[in-house]
Amino acid sequence: MNPKDYEDYQKNNVKASKSQLKEYIQIYADMVKKLKSEDAIELESVKSNILKAYPEEIYFTLIDELERPVKLTLTEASKEYIIPVFTDIREYAVGSAKISKLFLDKLEMKVISPEDIEKIADEDEYFQGFVINPHSQNFNMNRNGSF
């Protein structure tokens, strides 16, 4: 979500803002379905738009009672995990309701920036990346913000 949109949301409770990143991911997903290959040259400009938009937005994630981000482990035997992030209030509302059913803890919303995600990546070797809008777009980025 654009930081200005978030300010409007806090001030006026406006929930209609759109994420530029969300739109790029949707274009990317639609193109992948048509092209049948993620390596197609036509996707390169969309990929660069996603990478360019990512640091310009803020995201929402879920934290537990100790203010730790919700972690989705990659396998039952592994300590490696990803964190879910959401691009806007609507995505957060849908995704958090579904994720909350999986946890017994009281979960709350936290605003998280690309810098916050970078800090987690620097401090925790088990952090493997994040999934954007897991219940609609389900777009994965690694710990470095790449696909």
Image (cartoon, rainbow, N blue to C red):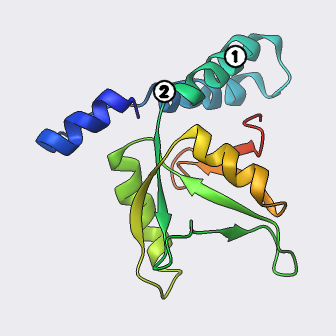
Location of residue 126 with respect to 36 vertically, above or below: below
- Under circle 2, the secondary element is helix
The quarter of the picture where the N terminus appears is top left
Q: Is residue 109 visible?
A: yes
Measured as percent of width and height from the top left, residue 83 is found at 63, 59
Q: Alpha-carbon neighbours of circle 1 within 10 Å: few (<14), some, or many (≥20)?
A: few
> Three-letter amino acid code at disc 1?
Ser
Q: Quadrant of the C terminus?
A: top right
In the picture of the structure, the residue carrying the numbered disc 2 is: 23
Residue 140 location in percent, x, y? 70, 45
**Which image quadrant for residue 70?**
bottom right
| Left or right, residue 114 beside residue 58 | right
Badge 1 or badge 2: first in the primary sequence = 2
**Residue lying at 17% horizontally and 39% vertically, measured from the top left:** 14
Q: In the picture shown, does residue 82 fall above or below 8?
A: below
Residue linked to disc 1: 48
Residue 119 as seen in the image, left or right of residue 14: right
Amino acid at circle 2: Glu
Residue 21 in picture, x, y percent from top left: 52, 29
